[in-house]
Amino acid sequence: MGNRLDQASSNRKVERRPVHGLVLLDKPLGLSSNQALQKVKWLLRAEKAGHTGTLDPLASGVLPLCFGAATKFSQLHLDADKSYEAIALLGATTSTGDAEGEVQQRRPVQFGADDLERVRVQFQGEIRQVPPMHSALKKDGRPLYEYARAGIKVEREARTVHIRELTLALVADGDVQTLRMQVRCSKGTYIRTLAEDIGEALGCGAHLTLLRRVETGGFGIGECVTLAQIEAWPDEERLQALRPVEDLLAGHGQIMLEPDDAGRFLSGVRRRGKWPDNPQVAVFGLRPHALLGTAHVAASELIPDRLLSPTDIEQILAHQAPNQIT
């Protein structure tokens, strides 16, 4: 009888609720980005969720998760620069470019400080990268890692990426030599490939053993919460992990509208005012104070881009009420 009750409890459907906002998650090792998203979505009992770009299961760190109205603006952060801390083991290459693969070649590590600085300069700025086979990049609708697991090698075109900042430090521990890397880069940069290419340029080969994203789109690791923290909170307190939807629009200009103009704007109607041209603005209603959506300004015209629904706005305002968590 007890087993039946346990099974019934585990099969009970989660009662979803409208949740709007952003969770900055410190994604743990071993989970895919989607697995982490679904876990937090379940913990918050949220109706709608999405993330702003992926992290490999073997990577940890900053993963912004969007809920409800915030999903309307998640695309903005897909293009954001990202910062990583990584460790590469020198002297060995693997089939996957990381510690999960089989060692393919071993070579002695023989280079000096001048060589390391030369290579650092070589890989800073605009570079070309060939995406790795063990990646989620798709070919004919299938991720490359599926081809790799089947033993099929697919031709990939090199892509241009930008390494904004690169710091390399050699660390020796007995016979083991590793390269500590700090990287700030454009979207689409594969740190695993960067480590491999740097290893080749140093003449010894390398593969990635640790990867941690410490910043993306202005969100740093110090602002994140962990899955363990969210799990430890009682259900009624888990919404404290949410940040406001407008945190996704920190780089936008701001325009405030009176109630009449706010209503028309929400209906998709352009508004005229003494505003300077601006390609990205966040638009708020004054009374009550609430995010309405995003727009751009051209020739003193406020032109709607992405709008929140009146229902979304009402739900957000309700959750902002003092001491009210539903």
Image (cartoon, rainbow, N blue to C red):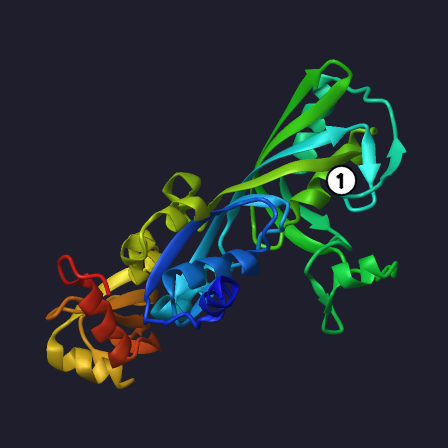
What residue sits 52% from the left and 63% below the top? Answer: 3
The reply, left or right, for residue 316 in relation to residue 289 is right
Q: Residue 51: where, in percent of width, then height?
A: 48, 61
The answer to which of 107 and 148 lies nearer the viewer is 148
Q: Residue 21: where, in percent of width, then height?
A: 33, 62
The reply, left or right, for residue 80 in relation to residue 325 is right
On the question of residue 79 being in view, the answer is no
Query: Mark 1 — residue?
Result: 197
The answer to which of 39 and 208 lies nearer the viewer is 39
Q: Quadrant of the C terminus?
A: bottom left
Check disc 1: other Cα within 10 Å, few if <14, some if 14-19, many if 20+: some
The answer to which of 142 and 149 lies nearer the viewer is 149
Quarter assignment of residue 91: top right
The reply, left or right, for residue 119 in relation to residue 54 is right
Residue extending farthest to the front is 1
On the question of residue 8 being in view, the answer is yes
The reply, left or right, for residue 88 in relation to residue 296 is right
**Which element is circle 1 on?**
helix
Please, is residue 201 above or below residue 40 in the view? Answer: above
Number of numbered discs present? 1
Please, is residue 299 above or below residue 126 in the view? Answer: below
What residue sits 68% from the left and 46% below the top? Answer: 127
What residue sits 41% from the left and 59% below the top? Answer: 43
Quarter assignment of residue 151: bottom right
Q: Residue 20: where, in percent of width, then height?
A: 32, 66
The amino acid pointed to by label 1 is Asp
The answer to which of 211 and 259 lies nearer the viewer is 211
